[in-house]
Amino acid sequence: MNKRVNGPAAFAGSSVRLPPSRTEDRNPLSVSIDRMPTMELLRLINAEDRSVPAAVAVVLPALAAAVDLAVQALSGGHRVHYVGAGTSGRIAVLDAAELIPTFGIEAGRVVAHLAGGTHALTNPSEDAEDDEDAGTALAGQVAAGDLVVGLTASGRTPYVRAALTMARRAGAGTVLISANPASPLAPLADVHVAPDTGPEVITGSTRMKAGTAQKLVLNAFSTATMVRLGRTYSNLMTDMQASNDKLRSRQLRILAEATGADVTTSRAALAEAGGDAKLAVVMLLAGTSAARARQALTEAHGHAHRALSRLEVLVVDEEVAGGGE
């Protein structure tokens, strides 16, 4: 009588060989997860999740290089494109959408391309990640000088591979964000950001640690890029879009924090600045008009600290010139 073997031993002698991917390895700590009581199961997931920030910390030098490429592209009038499928692509869509209200970046400057389109945002579209033709078709939207950021937890997604290949041909910069240091797509990227999050608690479920790592990486990538572009003053969201009462109140708090002005003064400066909080900050701190502050910001390419420095120099020059008369 043949003995039926269930569990890991059933595949012990398998000759199957697949491309290496840490995201598909089995986690030895969770092999009995289906027999754990709820609290033990949750503690295991939580313990694994705590390893993700440490994995991201290891790849910060590569992430810094990616940020510099994004700053170069955007400051040169070009665009940044996120390209991904499944969880990675959905995280990219979220990140790109939130940059507009948070940092006032113009619509269309940071664009997310999700395999399967908008339908895939809320519906399973697993086959879309194999659509290389769709990745190649992005050529119509990518130009020389742009930056294409491919996101794939496994580091193998055909849709992303085709998009990165196309980007190289178009003369765009390329970044790969994966959870697979051995990704076969790495040669297609100028920079590979690959936090090694290891095997998932549920084998291959990359919406877990790998997905969390991609969220952390994109949060840091886009935030650092916006700060480097002058889209904040200190740690204050001076460039945000104040589209509701809560955000309009936040603008007044930002002005008070940045300048020490009272609510009445802040509201008047904001009105004179046409609702532009950063312009109002420069006006209040420099004690100057909206027109003069706007000119200084333009010359400083939107960086408030640089604009203030220019205005200080201008005041000193005027005082020297006045004394010479």
Image: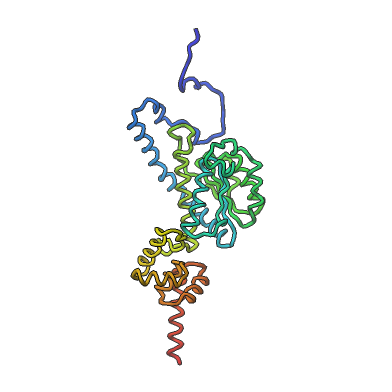
Q: Nearer the viewer, residue 226 or 125?
A: 125
Residue found at the very far front of the displayed protein: 245
Name which quarter of the figure residue 245 lies in: bottom left
Q: How is the image coloured?
A: rainbow
Could you tell me residue 284's position as x and y percent? Answer: 40, 73
* Left or right: where 159 falls relative to 242: right
Position of 298 relative to 45 (above/below): below
Number of marks drawn: 0
Position of 76 relative to 86 (above/below): below
Position of 19 relative to 259 (above/below): above
Q: Is residue 264 visible?
A: yes
Q: Nearer the viewer, residue 313 or 55?
A: 313
Residue found at the very far bottom of the displayed protein: 325
* Residue found 46% across the figure and 79% down from its top: 314
Could you tell me residue 193's position as x and y percent? Answer: 51, 47
Q: Is residue 190 visible?
A: no
Could you tell me residue 226's position as x and y percent? Answer: 48, 59
* Residue found 55% across the figure and 57% down from its top: 107
Looking at the rendered image, the quarter that the C terminus falls into is: bottom left
* Left or right: where 48 falls relative to 91: left
* Residue found 43% across the figure and 31% down from its top: 27
Could you tell me residue 269's position as x and y percent? Answer: 41, 72
